[in-house]
Image: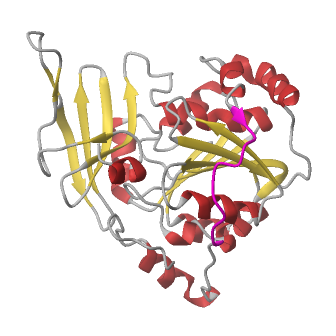
Amino acid sequence: MSPAGQGWSRRALLQAGGAGAVGLAVGHVGASVVVERTLAEARSQYNHVRVGERGTVRTMYFVGDDGMQYIESRVDRALPASLDLDYTRTMMAGFLVQPRPRRLLMLGLGGGGMSNYLYGRISGLEIDAVDIDPEVVRLAQTYFDVPKDDPRYRCHVEDARLFVERATQQWDMIMLDAFRGVFVPFHLKTVEFYQAVLARLSPQGVVVANLHNATRMYPHDRETMAAVFPTRHSFVSEGGNQTTLVASAQTRRLGPYAIRSNARLAQPTFDFDLQGLAARLYLRRDWDHAEVLRDDFDKTELKAATERHNETCVKGCRYGL
């Protein structure tokens, strides 16, 4: 993988043979080769989406114009009640700060890996999952067991910024994972967006953001979130290239002992070691000073602005900087 590929990697990065490729063969020389087969493929205004399956592992990919595939969501159907991807397990760090959420807002559904996991493990948890792409929602419901008609697991086909700006209720946990392949639209990275998110948090609520710490945008992300959220906790992923930032309106950051106490409180919900995740809390500053990201969208023109910034931006994107 090239340095540029590492910097922009949404999850794992796979080299495809082009749009519509059957899939990749894996295995050692002389061993049986398992070929990934395509279960479904769709194109929308926003994405080229492919669902592939190799053995018991089912994957949703976003396919770039160059044929590169980016893993959007993955589930091992032999272990459907577990989180298969490193970054999704790290995103559970929100429970180390807010161990008992009752209402969850998921911005970016993908294949529903995290929202499905929490839906199945937390009795009574109410989930609102928002994704701009109707094809992503359709494929998630068809191939990844996202419920279609469940009063406590509601899927909304809408731009995340517009949904948050129009919302009137509050959530105990808001997860930010609204990638378009390898980038997050600009209007979901600014002070104005985070202020709207902060207004939708319950008093003890937390925002959980998935950040790539090796990209050129990472310093801007950290500075921008610091300009809005008084308290931030950083947790590094198992692979080291992603940071889960847990932010809140609280004025005091929790110390390691409080984090571990919350890990013990939340542990019965999870099938992996939350104390191990708690140990990946870090306090060091791992970014340089950078410009805070702001937008100047007129409220009456917000819909047009979001549509403009939802355009694909994989190569040469400067986010207005």
Q: Is residue 166 magenta?
A: no
x and y, in percent, of residue 43 in the image:
24, 59
x and y, in percent, of residue 283 in the image:
75, 41
Q: Is residue 290 left or right of residue 132?
A: right
Q: Is residue 283 magenta?
A: yes
Q: Nearer the viewer, residue 150 or 288?
A: 288
Asked if 42 appears above or below 278 in the picture, the reply is below
Residue drawn at point x = 86 percent, y = 44 percent: 253
x and y, in percent, of residue 85 in the image:
45, 31
Q: Quadrant of residue 35?
A: top left
Residue range (magenta): 281-292
Q: Main secondary structure of the magenta part?
A: loop
x and y, in percent, of residue 206 in the image:
75, 48
Numbered-mark total: 0
Asked if 43 appears above or below 5 in the picture, the reply is below
> Farthest top residue?
31
Residue drawn at point x = 33 percent, y = 65 percent: 46
State the scheme by which the image is colored.
secondary structure
Q: Nearer the viewer, residue 250 or 109?
A: 250
In the picture, which quadrant includes the N terminus?
A: top left
